[in-house]
Each structure stands twice: as structure tokens, then as C-alpha cells.
Amino acid sequence: MKGTVLGIEGTAWNLSAAFVDEKDVIAEVTHTYVPPVGGIHPREAAQHHARFASHVIGKLLDEGRKKGISRSMIDGISFSQGPGLGACLRTVATAARALSLSLDVPLMGVNHCLAHIEIGRWKTPARDPVTLYVSGANSQVLAYNMGKYRVFGETLDIGLGNALDKFARSAQLAHPGGPKIEELAKKARNYIPMPYVVKGMDLSFSGLSTAATDALAKASLEDVCYSFQETAFSMVVEVTERALAHTGKNEVLLAGGVGANMRLREMLKIMCEDRGAYFYVPEKRFMGDNGAMIAYLGLLMLNSGNTISVENSHVNPNFRPDSVEVTWINEKDGEGDL
Ligand code: AMP
Ligand code: MG
């Protein structure tokens, strides 16, 4: 694998651009949208990305230059094509197209969920894991099989992070609520029963979020935070464990912003130890949304001829990871380490 790719992430709250080559992340520049009140407002997030795109990319080019990357050394441009907020995706895609045209290099449209998995496979020893991807908007259990990353289970409504954030807002906690809920849960005394909704291999968090808000009328905030976490995390661990059993794989990779939660990690670790499976968590900077993962999957795609023309580079807010043909893993030749 060779080349240097500039990748841009901007599916929701985080605008982030990075340079990677096959060895490492060369530089990364990020500017984060922080809602003044409430949760993420799609139009305001997109306006944030439009306002800061040239600043972020300009700064990245400067940082790259300091590390010896001149413009003529950029071999391709990649961007988050989806899933994500439509207005945000369009803003970032516009910047990526302009760069690809002006530098006259190929363009790669990256599936954001798969980028989370691939950076995890790059930056941890995981080779062929079952991935639990839990972020603001997404919650999925995925694993590679015969040319595609298959979705073994997923949320039927909102993502786990959004469920935590929504409950947190109802409790007057500032966005993002996940880290605050984690801290409060440590001071809990009691578990309050909450709706545990696993349907086959799929999950539902929206009723849990509402039930947690209702429970505040009769229980302490700490107890509700704890009970929410224990219930939701047990649900995702159950589905991850069944995906392991079904696929016969022996590695679990954690991805997405909710993966920062130490209690979730602890529960997954216990489950993996019980089954004799390895458990891998990337460094925190590679867990939430980041430009490096978009640049890295862009590099894999570039090297496997998976590029798109500007005409065909429209964004896809519902871009499913299991619709992507995985050109960068070649099982027969052992490429991609599977
Ligand atoms: P992402 O969409 O992958 O960037 O992740 C953002 C989500 O991660 C938000 O919903 C946050 O509330 C959530 N999050 C971040 N840190 C934690 C934490 N320590 N515990 C639970 N959720 C978290
Ligand atoms: Mg994400």
C-alpha cells in the first residue's frame, strides 16, 4: 500500500481533516461544533463546518508542509459520504470535491461506520473482529464476511449516544450527556428496573431514554444514570456476544464515542474473558469521529481502485455499511490481514 491521503470528516458535530500514509497519521486538525443550548442542530452544525472548512484544511496543509508533505505529494482526497446529517455531509463533500479538482487527484467517498472499524484494525492488534460501534447516531454490531461488513444487530430507533444525550438534556445536563451520566452513575446506590429491549439481534433505546426521564420523578439522578447505563450496556453486550458465538470470531473491537465509557469497557471485557476472546479498544482520539479514520479508509480505497468521479460523489445520509463492497480486503492473497 502506498500514498498520502487527505481525509475530511464532518458527518455531525466534528469537523476534522487529516493526512495519513501507510505508516501513520501525519497530521490532524479539528474544529468542533458545540451547541450553545440543547443538542446538535443540523443546520447550525453545517454552518459551522462551512465557516471553518477553509481554516481547518489550510491549517492541515501548513502542518503537513512542516512534516514534509507538499501539495504535489497528495495522492487522493477522501470524505465522509454518509451516514450523517445531510447538510453537514454536503458541506464537507463540497470541500473535498474542490480539493480533488484543484489538485487533480482521485476522490474517495468513505462510509463513516467502516472508517471506525478500519482505524480500529489499524491501530489495535484486532484482525478480524466483531465490532461494537456505538456513537451518537449509530449503534451497530458488525463483522466481515465474504466481501462485506455485515450488520449482525443494530438499533431500530436512535443511537445509544443520542439516547444518553436526550435523557441528559431532560435532566438539565449540558450536551454531550454521555460523560456526565458516566460520572453520576459512579455515585449511585440502587438499580431501578428499566426497559431492556433486544428484539432478535436488534436494539431499541428510545423507550429507555423516556423511561429514564420518567424515573427522575421518584429516584435520584445518580440511580437513574446508573440504571440507564447498566440496562443499555447489557443490551449491547448481549448482542455482541451472540454475534461472536454465531460468527465463531474471537476478537471484539469497540468503536464510536460511547466507547469512551469505562463501565461499558469493563462489561465487554468480562464477556470477552468468559468466552476466551480478545477485547480491543483504540486510543481515545481514534474512537469518536475523527479525520484520520476517513483519510485511512480513503487510503485503503485508493490502493484498491475504489475511487469516484465528482459527478457520482453525491452524499448519502443513510449510507449503510453493509452496502459497501470491501475492495481493500483480499482474503485469497491474505491482504488486509483477514
Ligand atoms: P460520536 O458520534 O462517535 O462522535 O460519539 C458521540 C457520542 O458519544 C455522544 O452521544 C456522547 O454523549 C457519547 N459519549 C462520549 N463520551 C461518553 C462516555 N464517557 N460515556 C457515554 N457516552 C459518551
Ligand atoms: Mg461516528
Image (spheres, helix red, strand yellow):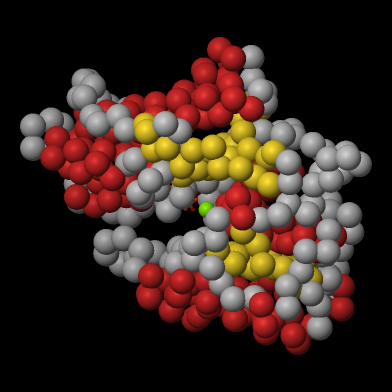
Farthest residue, direction left: 218
> Residue sitting at 85 percent across and 60 percent down?
303
Instruction: Tell me if residue 188 can be seen.
Output: yes
- On the image, the x and y values in percent for residue 272 come to 57, 20
Choose top left, top right, bottom left or bottom right for residue 2.
Answer: bottom right
- On the image, the x and y values in percent for residue 311 come to 67, 83
> Residue sitting at 59 percent across and 14 percent down?
275
For the N terminus, give its image quadrant.
bottom right
- Judged left or right of residue 103, residue 313 is left
**Above-or-below relation of 311 to 150:** below
- On the image, the x and y values in percent for residue 169 come to 24, 52
- On the image, the x and y values in percent for residue 310 come to 69, 81
Residue nearest the observer in this picture, 307 or 37: 307
> Residue sitting at 60 percent across and 50 percent down?
322
Choose top left, top right, bottom left or bottom right for residue 63.
Answer: bottom right
**Above-or-below relation of 161 to 324:** above
Residue nearest the observer in this picture, 246 or 102: 246
Farthest residue, direction bottom: 102
**Above-or-below relation of 221 to 114:** above
- Judged left or right of residue 264, residue 72 is right
> Residue sitting at 77 percent across and 60 percent down?
301
- Judged left or right of residue 17, residue 146 is right
Residue nearest the observer in this picture, 55 or 223: 223
For the C terminus, give its image quadrant.
top right
Instruction: Tell me if residue 14 can be seen.
Output: no
Q: How many numbered dots are placed on residues in this image? A: 0
